[in-house]
Amino acid sequence: MTEPDPVRYARQLALPQLGADGQARLAHGSALVIGLGGLGATAALYLGNAGVGHLVINDYDRVDASNLPRQILFQPDDVDEYKTHAAAEKLRAYNSKLRVSVLNRRLAEDELTDAVSACHVVLDCTDNFATRLQINRACAAARKPLVMGAAIRFEGQVGVFRHERDGPPCYQCLYSENDENLDDCAGQGILAPVAGAIGCLMATEAMKIIAGLSSELDGRLWLYDGLAGTSRSIGIAANPECPVCHPGN
Amino acid sequence: MKTIRIEYFAALREHTGLSSEEIATDAQTVDQLYAELDGRHEFPALGQLKVAVNDEFGDWQSGLADGDLVVFIPPVAGG
């Protein structure tokens, strides 16, 4: 691993909270991005461009023309290509030092736990509660920090769950199998930059975790209402009966 | 009778046309408050709403005190 390029990363190296040490941590860091939709395609682009050394990207869909307004990693020529393949090619073109690994299939529970175990941080950029709960379980089993984002219509949510620590709440302390999918992007509309905004926040939180910077978002859910132009942050209490983070009960 | 401030978020804000309101209520719990508000506003079906009291997620049986701030939050899973 060579030192991070001082010219390319000059404006991040100028941040005293990050600096050369933080940028080096990013270069040695790895992130698993699950789902390459409006959230994941944006988050992966920033993580790769901003110096995270290794990205593992997971999706099994192909690029559709209706993805292009918000999944800005992809271009019209990518339509009908696998998202992972198109994304890997683009990410490497943006940053030749970036290592990209591709998981081009739906991961079974044990495969998912293996993939989570191999990374420093996991970004849940998927689009349904069942998969989100599965990712949360895998992060708990592997004790890896999870950055969760979701977006629909003009709304977005971001949460940070520090599974590597004892005590904080997890995703399942908030959402359960009883929650319904009323809101996938295909079924209802979404304003393209709302997804991008949430993807960028997820990338920010993931980079802070890799760089060792603390966050007020740990154990909280940040809500964005893009139509109103408002946001708020809500605390999540660890549920003592949560089957994932309090399995002894 | 206690005074509760309700802030509306996302789809509920659009539906009610209100960003917030204050009501005087005898509701003892969050679900009693929701039923009272539903009677006024006829909320649309939005899946299982989450509720926050004073910016902490709570459950529907959470008790209410004078001056509490309540926010109902539609679930979001899309990506």
Image: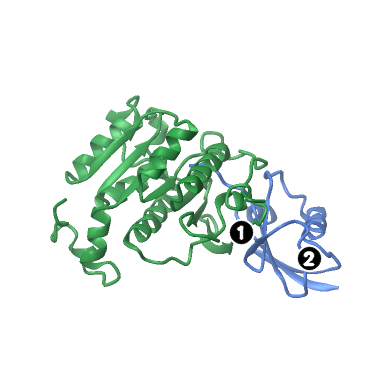
Check chain identity for marks 1 and 2: say if they share one. Answer: no
Q: Which mark is residue A238?
A: 1
- What amino acid is found at the position of numbered circle 2 in the picture? Gly
The answer for which chain carries disc 2 is: B
Label 1, label 2: how many angstroms apart (C-alpha)?
19 Å
Question: Which chain is displayed in green in the rendered image?
Answer: A
Observer-nearest of A186 and A119: A119
Quickly name the residue at label 2. Answer: B63
Q: Position of residue A241 (x, y in %)?
A: 67, 53
The answer for which chain carries disc 1 is: A
Give the vertical position of A136 relative to A79 (above or below).
below
> How many marks on residues?
2
Q: Secondary structure at mark 2?
A: loop
| Mark 2 nearby-residue class (10 Å; few <14, some 14–19, many ≥20) | some
Q: Position of residue A102 (x, y in %)?
A: 31, 34
Q: Colour of chain B?
A: blue
